[in-house]
Image: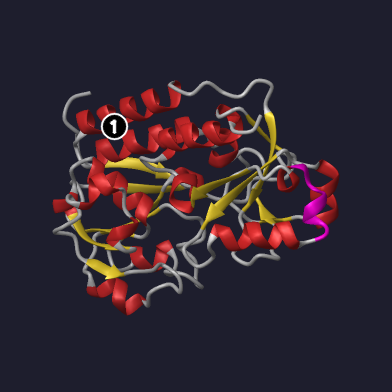
């Protein structure tokens, strides 16, 4: 593709976003969107980032040096005043629900201030159909928005190579994803989302793929988990809840102790940023695959 022709119209979660030029002051709302822009060499187009720099991939931390940290944590959500003080022209989100009243505020409310907003596709309210290819498409779209198509193509090629290097477990192992932010919260993913696709590519089979894709927000019963009896448990690691605590809780709990994965100590820990669209997705499939193979 040649240079971007502006104005450029992008369809994003059912809304049209029109760019008259490449955004100059982007506020990235989480580490995954920060890492994409840094990997595309766009630090000088950033007004700031939400999230701590030590949460970023080590190889991107130097590129983040000039970028201002607006707040070190996305939860609780920073106030609207804090967001507006950064003087952004684009808010870039990688998590569903960011542009709602209880979070950063609606997209319409920012549009009134001539501030654009954009979700990565996995964060749209969708019925599924989101895969690793969707992440690639989002990165290529950002390449067009910022007129850096070659950097975007190079990044996608690298991610594709990471994903292609994986030898998936055969036959697939059955997997339960623990995405709760409290030990007794059995929150998991359904089918049709990015992490479900990554698990499949790594040689796993999500035991709750029959549930809807609603981010990491399906609540399931202990009885159902025991009945489906996963061979491996993937724990999504949030800073607030160490994975070691979850594992210790499961091993001590009479219900969890009936589950094959707990009996055989087959846990795979994956950072939350690897489970949402971003530069880590390709290598995360390799991490999952290695975890699924261990003890098989």
Span of residues in magenta: 254-260
Q: Position of residue 70 (x, y in %)?
A: 27, 70
- 6 vs 47: above or below: above
| Left/right of residue 79 with respect to residue 62 in the rendered view | right
Question: For this rendering, which residue is in front, 15 or 164?
Answer: 164
**Looking at the image, can residue 129 be seen?**
no
Residue 111 on the magenta segment = no
| Left/right of residue 269 with respect to residue 72 in the rendered view | right
Residue placed under numbered mark 1 in the picture: 155
**Quadrant of the drawing holding the C terminus:** top right
| Left/right of residue 295 with respect to residue 81 in the rendered view | right
**Quadrant of the drawing holding the N terminus:** top left
Q: Position of residue 265 (x, y in %)?
A: 67, 45
Mark 1, secondary structure of its residue: helix
Instruction: Say which residue appears at 75% left-offset and 46% top-offset.
Output: 263
Residue 255 on the magenta segment = yes
Instruction: Say which residue appears at 59% left-offset and 64% top-offset.
Output: 181
* Colouring scheme applied when the structure was drawn: secondary structure
**Looking at the image, can residue 179 be seen?**
yes
Question: For this rendering, which residue is in front, 42 or 114?
Answer: 42
Question: For this rendering, which residue is in front, 120 or 178?
Answer: 178
Q: Position of residue 268 (x, y in %)?
A: 57, 44
| Left/right of residue 229 with respect to residue 276 in the rendered view | right
Local crowd size for mark 1, using a 10 Å CA cut-off: few (<14), some (14–19), many (≥20):
some
Instruction: Say which residue appears at 57% left-offset and 34% top-offset.
Output: 197
- 102 vs 54: above or below: below
- 22 vs 180: above or below: above
Instruction: Say which residue appears at 43% left-offset and 69% top-offset.
Output: 105
């Amino acid at each position: 593709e040649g240079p971007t022709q502006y104005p450029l119209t992008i369809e994003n979660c059912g809304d049209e976003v029109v760019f008259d030029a490449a955004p100059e002051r982007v506020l990235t709302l989480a580490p995954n969107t920060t890492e994409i822009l840094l990997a595309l060499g766009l630090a000088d187009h950033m007004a700031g980032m939400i999230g701590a720099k030590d949460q970023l991939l080590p190889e991107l931390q130097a590129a983040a040096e000039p970028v201002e940290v607006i707040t070190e944590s996305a939860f609780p959500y920073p106030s609207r005043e804090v967001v507006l003080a950064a003087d952004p022209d684009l808010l870039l989100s990688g998590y569903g629900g960011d542009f709602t009243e209880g979070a950063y505020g609606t997209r319409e409310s920012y549009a009134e201030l001539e501030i654009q907003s954009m979700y990565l596709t996995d964060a749209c309210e969708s019925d599924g159909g989101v895969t690793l290819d969707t992440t690639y498409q989002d990165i290529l779209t950002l390449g067009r928005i910022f007129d850096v198509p070659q950097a975007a193509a190079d990044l996608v090629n690298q991610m594709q190579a990471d994903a292609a290097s994986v030898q998936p477990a055969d036959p697939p192992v059955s997997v339960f994803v623990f995405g709760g932010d409290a030990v007794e919260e059995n929150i998991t993913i359904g089918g049709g989302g990015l992490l479900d696709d990554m698990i499949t590519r790594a040689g796993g089979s999500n035991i709750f793929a029959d549930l809807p894709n609603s981010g990491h927000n399906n609540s399931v019963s202990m009885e159902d988990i025991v009945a489906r009896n996963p061979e491996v448990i993937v724990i999504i690691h949030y800073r607030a809840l160490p994975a070691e605590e979850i594992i210790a809780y499961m091993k001590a709990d009479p219900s969890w102790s009936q589950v094959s994965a707990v009996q055989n100590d087959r846990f795979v820990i994956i950072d939350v940023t690897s489970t949402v669209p971003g530069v880590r997705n390709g290598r995360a499939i390799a991490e999952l695959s290695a975890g699924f193979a261990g003890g098989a």
